[in-house]
Image (cartoon, grey):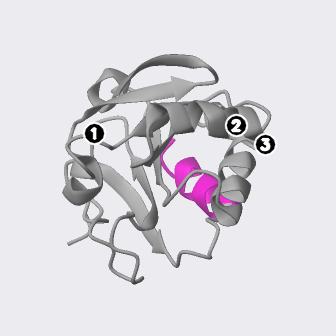
Amino acid sequence: MVLKVGDPAPDFKLTCATGETQGEFELSAHRGKNVLLAFYPLDFTPVCQSELGSFQADLDKFTGTNTQVVGICTDSVFAHIAFQKHLGGLKYPLATDRWPYAEVATAYGVFPPTKHPIPFINDRAVFIVDKNGKIAWSKVYELREQPDNKEILEQLSKLG
């Protein structure tokens, strides 16, 4: 079941890449900021390329709302590094939910997939975790549907 507004956001620590730099992304380390968790199915797919590129294009708008953006999927950190390079570089992390496989996506209710027949990828979904670690907004998308940054930014503006 997908987490609902008001639910506590499950904490996690995942290996991530920002550009060619590897590190870790821990949700609880960002308390006091909003966090946009962008679950996406696979690196190098057309909609994912457009989605993650649009987050980069609007990154100043997201950071202007005191928000940390992070992309999450089950691809490896090495795939994330290559994908970011393919996109011309990203200034926000892509985290790998690879081991245990899809553990974070499962905790957020977006794995196994709910709306598509591909069994090994998570849903495309966005969660906004507020400064106190609660789900402030979420939406699950069709695989071919790109999240609308304007809609997400409107939700973030309500958080103050």
The residues bearing labels 2 and 3 have C-alpha atoms spaced at a distance of 6 Å
Q: Is residue 159 magenta?
A: yes
Q: Residue 36 appears at what percent x and percent y? A: 48, 45
Tag 3: amino acid: Ala
Q: Residue 45 appears at what percent x and percent y? A: 64, 60
**Number of numbered discs present?**
3
Q: Is residue 45 magenta?
A: no
Whether tag 2 and tag 3 are in contact, CB under 8 A, the answer is yes
Horizontal relation, residue 72 to residue 99: left or right: right
Foreground of the two, 123 or 64: 123
Secondary element type, mark 1: loop
Q: Residue 88 appears at what percent x and percent y? A: 80, 34
Q: Which residues are magenta?
A: 149-160
| Residue placed under numbered mark 3 in the picture | 57
Identify the residue shown where x is 33% and y is 79%. Answer: 114
Residue 59: mark:
2
Query: Of tags 3 and 1, which is closer to the observer?
Result: 3
Within 10 angstroms of label 1, few (less than 14), some, or many (20 or more) residues? many
The residues bearing labels 1 and 2 have C-alpha atoms spaced at a distance of 21 Å
Within 10 angstroms of label 2, few (less than 14), some, or many (20 or more) residues? some
Q: Quadrant of the N terminus?
A: bottom left
First in sequence: mark 1 vs mark 2: 2
Tag 2: amino acid: Leu
The residues bearing labels 3 and 1 have C-alpha atoms spaced at a distance of 26 Å
Q: Is residue 60 visible?
A: no
Foreground of the two, 15 or 141: 15
The chief SS type of the magenta part is helix
Within 10 angstroms of label 3, few (less than 14), some, or many (20 or more) residues? few
| Residue placed under numbered mark 1 in the picture | 133
Foreground of the two, 6 or 86: 86
